[in-house]
Amino acid sequence: MLRQRQRQLNNHLFAVIIILFSLITIIKSIQGQNFNDNNNNGNDFYVVQLPSTASGIQIPSYSHGFSLEMSHWTNVFSTRTNNKQSTGFLQLLGNIQDRRGSLMLRLGGNSQDAATSDESINSPIAKTGEQATRTNSGATTFNIKVHSQIFDAMRQISHIVPMKWMIGLNFEDANNTESAQILGKLAVDSLLDDDLLYSIQIGNEPDLYAKHGVRKAEWGIEDYTNEWMEWATQLSHHYFNNSDKTTSVKSTISKRRNIFTGGVICCTWQLQDLIDSGYFERSKDLINSITVQKYSSNACFGVAKGDISDFTSHSWITSLPRTMYEESAKIVIENNKELIMGETNSAACRGIQGISDTYISALWSIDWQLFLYSIGFSSVELQLGGSTSHYNPMSKVGGSWIVNPIYYGSLVTAEALGPSDAKPQVVHIDVSSDSRAAYAIFHQQALKYIVLINLNPDEEAVFSLQSSFAGSWWNNDENGDENNILKVKRLTADSLQEKHAIQWAGQTLQGVSDGLLRGDIEIDQVECNDLNQCEITLPQASVALVGRDFDEYHTTIIADHPFDVDDFLGVNNTYNHDNFTNPLRMAGATTSATTTFILLPSATSLFISISLVIYYMFIII
């Protein structure tokens, strides 16, 4: 009898657990349906008037990437013994490349102005331990030596993860071009013929040279223009054969001298100053682009400027680029030059703790990047600093690379802009709200996606998509058939302060050390019953990528690539790829190259859950 009663109690306990589990499933199902409900249930909604035609520049495949301090090369690409370190970092780069077809990596920064060529060192880059002389600077810069093998490494890396490079040269001493001649010539000869070299930068942030004691106090933009033109002309003659304007390798790609990017300014000079001073006009034959560098805020000298309310304000996020670049960008573009944001992040000087290292930075970066594209920027590079920087998109912890929140923003924008042949254009849409934002993404002149951003951490947002063109966007699919369904991928986290538990379309990199996303892709479906409008609900502090369908992309697994990490880093340790175990397989995850979209109808889940509750209630009774 006692055993029978015990079994009954166990059955009842099991039934109670099943009921609770089922009730939770029901609640989540109902909440999920609320996000997809085409009625706003009395909530305020934000009108998103869909543009009928594309505008703005066609953004190239190298639209996004990372800016790396030259002195941090060894830390990023590992050293002699641990191959997995470089594999993880390259995988994180590969995730962006898989979605866009390419990316940009800028190697330079403050340390480029302290770099000299040295063939006696046994690594691509070595710090001397001597601090460069700088005054009134919030950054510490060390002198470094650069070996020619670094350009072989760049070429090898670009064959693993297709990317272009921006290379910075030392402009510290206007009377000494030796290092620039040697390193620039190596870059051109090693990278240009394979179309891997985007541009060469002569100096980093010259508008701060006088302040930092690199030039005399009265040195200004006119002096810079004269010095830069003398250098660029001399270096161009050195890099290229004067008779046919080619390098030693005769190819169509290398038959150009406009290999430089101009400016690389950040602070005291504006883009318009480069135009008004005559620099832009004088340099046009030698440059392919103008580079500016700007952070939304800064934390220099230990004082943080900007708080959470700023970084969750659409008008604050966009006000700086709108004021500094929007009008001047038109002149650059009209002259067939590209505008590059060569170094950026949430806040200069390592970032702001609690903002730069949290989910806030992911929301900020999506809004920041898309607005820059909408006003004419061709590429945006996030700064990757030292190990103590709060703003890093990824960090090396215990020998493995992990992602930080802002990296998710790069996944979202890369997926929105699409593959290399998409020819994307970004149109900013005014939704008359300081905590909400919207962008239209066109692929090949046709509306492909809408990006909706809810910056409000406390309230959900209902966006009313409204179409004025015939048939509406959601009632005609790409084949011309009627289709009233829109699909939604979401970027979500539980709070603004979240650092790890962040999901992009149901997948996450939380706890991942190999750089590969985990989890099943989740795509919501929204039924649009009204021909003229369709409502999309976003939970608080989230982003939605909305489209009629999503491009599939191939997931490249870097660990399966037969490369020799130590070899391309210029060291002697042997890397046996045949004996290397794929960390993805070690984790027991899928290695499928094609993403599979699995949608479970919410009505079915609801029916099953209710049935289980009723069934087990009868068991208890």
Image (cartoon, helix red, strand yellow):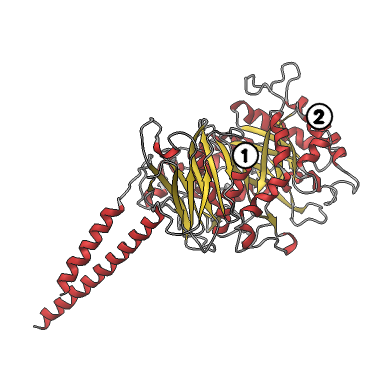
Q: Quadrant of the C terminus?
A: bottom left
Circle 2 packing at 10 Å, graded few (<14), some (14-19), many (20+), is some
Q: Nearer the viewer, residue 480 or 541?
A: 480
Is residue 493 or residue 391 the one in the foreground?
493
- Say which residue appears at 39% left-offset and 34% top-offset: 477
Q: Which of 71 and 296 is in front in this view?
A: 296
Residue positioned most to the left: 1
Residue bearing the label numbered 2: 282
Q: In which quarter of the image is residue 471?
A: top left
Tell me if 328 is positioned left or right of 463 in this view: right
Q: Position of residue 158 (x, y in %)?
A: 56, 36
Circle on res. 157: none
Residue in view at x 19 percent, y 66 percent: 614
Q: Can residue 225 be seen in this view?
A: yes
Q: Is residue 119 visible?
A: no
Which amino acid does the dot numbered 2 rest on? Answer: Arg
In the displayed image of the protein, which residue is found farthest to the bottom? 2
Residue 113, image x and y in percent? Answer: 76, 44
Q: Which of marks 2 and 1 is nearer the N terminus?
A: 2
Tell me the SS state at disc 1: strand
For marks 2 and 1, give the CA distance.
Answer: 23 Å
Nearest to the observer: residue 109 or residue 331: 331
The residue where tag 1 is placed is 379
Left or right for 79, reference 277: left
